[in-house]
Image (spheres, grey):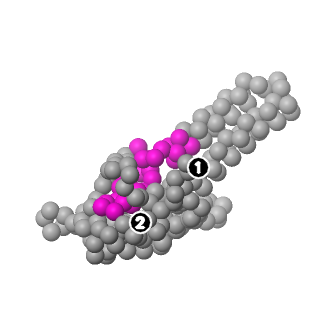
Amino acid sequence: MNSSEPKIILERRYGRNALGCGMVLIIIGFFVCIAIEPSSFEPILGFFGFLFVLVLFSFFSLSADKINIILTVNRMRFREGVWFKRKQMEIPWADIVEVNFIKKTSRSSEGVESESFELHLKEKGFDEVDKPHRIEYCSGFGRQVKYSLKTVHAAGAVQLIQDLIDADSKEARTEIVTKNMGVPEE
């Protein structure tokens, strides 16, 4: 992929920021617990250390550029799958047959609902059978355009991808990408 080619980078900025705040709260919680019960230093350190490492690992997995969705003039690049079974994919616009999103709602045992979204693509197959792809998109916050304050929710991402698929020329795609991309900080 050409680095000077215009591109829209959709990243999970809100999730990363929430995990960063979580790390700070874990550190503050550690010091508060030590101030209250200094004789229990080792168990408290073990508990908060475990939490910190878990959140730190999650932070770095969300911070990786590999989980970004990148829309260029020629193709779409994304990471497909869940957790450690993710693989990098690149699909030219002409090979994407269909795109939509699914809203998943899960309920905890306490009755708290959380929602998440997935993008579903179908790629032209070799044997007349289209190959499905599933991309974890976000929870309710959407993804943010890198170098911009713009947030793109799942429905907006589907519309943007559909516009790029339907564009009749490279110039039309260049216009769509340029209009929706963020501007790098210099």
Q: At 53% across and 41% down in the image, what residue appears?
A: 60
The x, y position of residue 94, in whole percent, is: 24, 67
Against 166, residue 46 (above or below) is: above
Q: In the displayed structure, does residue 165 sit left or right of residue 117?
A: left
The x, y position of residue 127, in whole percent, is: 13, 64
Q: Which residues are magenta?
A: 58-84
Against 105, residue 147 (above or below) is: above
Name the secondary structure under disc 2.
helix
- Say which of 79 and 186 sits in front: 186
Q: In the displayed structure, does residue 158 sit left or right of residue 30?
A: left
Name the mark on residue 177.
2
Q: At 34% across and 72% down in the image, what residue appears?
A: 172
Whether residue 84 is visible: yes
> Is residue 20 one of those drawn in magenta?
no
- Distance between the alpha carbons at the discs numbered 2 and 1: 25 Å
Q: Going from the N terminus, do you reach mark 2 or mark 1 first?
A: 1
- Say which of 93 and 118 sits in front: 93
Q: Which residue matches tag 1?
A: 16
